[in-house]
């Protein structure tokens, strides 16, 4: 089975103007013929949210690499939280609070994905598109996050199997997600597949970076991170 | 920052990497126009869709909603005139603000005789003129709370991507309708309760206890206006707080609510 995987993270105009670091982070790594992807968005109001986001991505990658192909993702979430707390020490969890989206795709197309906090997690399995992220109840930037206490009931997760070309998983932070037309997420997903499947990985990443840097929503300000993994053939 | 560039497995460089494949189409990729033989692959790519067409075409809004008491008592001691002038100044400042990373929207709800939407929620830069409040009638504050809650709960008028709205209540008297149930509904609504709530008591007859219960921003305890200048000072503090939020790293974070000191040279009579 073949996949195309691509990700990009760009600093938002607000942070660039203020000389602040990118508070988003991402990891996209091959693993035994499959892929691991994580995306995190440090809470803007917290002093070390950039550290929190980077640490969340790194510990998730390490944990997912060590799992067997038939692991249970929900049971792994408390371990991710625990390892994150260890990784950010001595920084307090409050200062490093971050959202986290993650997915693992095996060489056979088995996908496990989960999300805590805002952003968007989109999955297509057997040609059926699904938005895993629940509808936001309140307003922008009000989100659950990795902090001192593990909140199992605030996580969303899913599993499935990529059975046909065009199936895939897309993870993105709220800098992208909040500026997407909610009614056209499935079209967005398919357009992303079309665009990435026509480019090699390096060109795909450049194209994605350029799309995120030249974002069309007026006054857009937030950091933007997007990772996509698609099945392309048998 | 991304780490994929440096941290991919050796295996992953060769497994599933499209760069290692021929340029043939994916097995069942969606149909695309067939390029002519003379087209380079870059030309083919340039014809493809970009992600821009999926982006929302409007900025993220930051709604500011004022609940203004326009009952008969506001016609005394030039209170309504001071309020009209302060509102105009606030809207004008919002419209001119150039540091923004959000679009400030203004909505005005008045309650004097009846509660009504005096100005629907619109972008401040699009407000050409705010018609002046006229004082008259009783104080149906409960009905105004209902209007505010309906607005805050409406995802079409205030989308989920909006920054936390600011709700400002100002009154110089006691509500005289059944206000407690609408007040509790507003404060307990899953969505509406998340708004920042500020309050100003105008003059000695305002229901200070209720206004204190309404205010929920630790940075901004209830403000008491004793004269017309105080009304201006309060709205300047609101203006500064909102515009600071729109230019800050995180517009949803509460900012210091600093009411400017009174101008001692000015003569102003207390209400």
Image: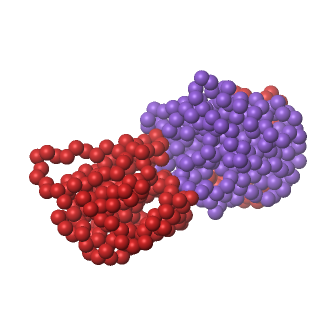
Chain colours: A purple, B red
Residue at position x 48%, y 47% in the image: B252
Residue at position x 59%, y 47% in the image: A143
Residue B26 image offset from top left, x and y in percent: 81, 50
Examine the image and state in which quarter residue B4 appears. Answer: top right
Q: Is residue A226 left or right of residue B160?
A: right
Residue B20 image offset from top left, x and y in percent: 80, 37
Residue at position x 75%, y 42% in the image: A103
From the viewer's perspective, is residue A217 above or below residue B254? below
From the viewer's perspective, is residue A121 above or below residue A82? below
Residue B26 seen by the camera: no
Residue B110 image offset from top left, x and y in percent: 35, 69
| Quadrant containing the C terminus of chain B in the rendered view | bottom left
Q: Which of A70 and A166 is in front in this view?
A: A70
Furthest residue toward top: A90
Examine the image and state in which quarter residue A173 appears. Answer: top right
Q: Nearer the viewer, residue B103 or A98?
A: A98
Residue at position x 51%, y 64% in the image: B185
Q: In this view, does A153 lie to the left or right of B59?
A: right
Q: Nearer the viewer, residue A227 or A70?
A: A70
Q: Is residue A192 left or right of residue A213?
A: right
Q: Which of B237 and A101 is in front in this view?
A: B237
Residue B250 seen by the camera: yes
């Amino acid at each position: 089975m073949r996949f195309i995987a691509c990700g990009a993270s760009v600093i938002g105009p607000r942070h660039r103007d203020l000389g602040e670091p990118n508070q988003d982070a991402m990891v996209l790594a091959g693993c035994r013929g499959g892929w691991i992807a994580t995306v995190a968005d440090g809470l803007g109001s917290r002093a070390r949210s950039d550290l929190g986001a980077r640490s969340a991505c790194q510990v998730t990658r390490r944990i997912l690499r060590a799992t067997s192909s038939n692991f249970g993702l929900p049971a792994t979430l408390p371990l991710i939280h625990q390892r994150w707390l260890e990784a950010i020490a001595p920084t307090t969890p409050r200062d490093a609070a971050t959202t986290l989206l993650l997915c693992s795709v095996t060489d056979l197309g088995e996908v496990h994905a989960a999300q805590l906090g805002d952003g968007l997690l989109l999955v297509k399995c057997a040609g059926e598109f699904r938005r895993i992220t629940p509808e936001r109840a309140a307003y922008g930037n009000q989100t659950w996050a990795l902090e001192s206490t593990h909140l199992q009931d605030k996580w969303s997760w899913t599993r499935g199997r990529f059975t046909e070309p065009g199936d895939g998983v897309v993870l993105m932070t709220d800098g992208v997600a909040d500026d997407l037309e909610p009614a056209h997420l499935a079209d967005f997903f398919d357009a992303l597949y079309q665009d990435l499947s026509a480019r090699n990985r390096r060109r795909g990443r450049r194209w994605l970076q350029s799309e995120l840097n030249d974002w069309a929503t007026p006054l857009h300000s937030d950091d933007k991170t997007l990772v996509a993994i698609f099945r392309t053939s048998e | 920052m991304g780490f994929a560039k440096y941290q991919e497995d050796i295996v992953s460089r060769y497994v599933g990497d499209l760069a290692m494949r021929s340029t043939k189409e994916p097995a069942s990729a969606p149909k695309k126009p067939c390029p002519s033989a003379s087209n380079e692959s870059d030309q083919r790519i340039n014809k493809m869709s970009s992600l821009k067409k999926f982006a929302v075409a409007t900025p993220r809004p930051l709604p500011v909603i004022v609940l203004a008491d326009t009952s008969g008592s506001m016609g005394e001691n030039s209170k309504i005139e001071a309020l009209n002038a302060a509102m105009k100044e606030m809207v004008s400042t919002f419209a001119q603000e150039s540091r923004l990373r959000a679009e400030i929207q203004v909505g005005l709800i008045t309650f004097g005789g009846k509660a009504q939407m005096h100005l629907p929620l619109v972008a401040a830069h699009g407000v050409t003129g705010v018609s002046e409040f006229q004082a008259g009638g009783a104080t149906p504050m409960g009905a105004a709370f209902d209007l505010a809650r309906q607005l805050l709960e409406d995802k079409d008028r205030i989308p989920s991507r909006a920054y936390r709205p600011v709700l400002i209540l100002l009154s110089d008297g006691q509500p005289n309708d059944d206000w407690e149930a609408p007040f509790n509904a507003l404060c307990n609504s899953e969505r509406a309760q998340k708004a920042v709530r500020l309050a100003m008591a105008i003059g000695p007859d305002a229901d200070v206890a209720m206004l204190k219960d309404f205010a929920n921003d630790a940075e901004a305890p209830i403000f008491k206006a004793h004269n017309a200048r105080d009304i201006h000072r309060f709205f300047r503090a609101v203006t500064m707080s909102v515009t600071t939020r729109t230019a800050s790293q995180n517009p949803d974070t509460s900012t210091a609510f600093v009411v400017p000191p009174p101008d001692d040279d000015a003569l102003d009579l207390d209400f």
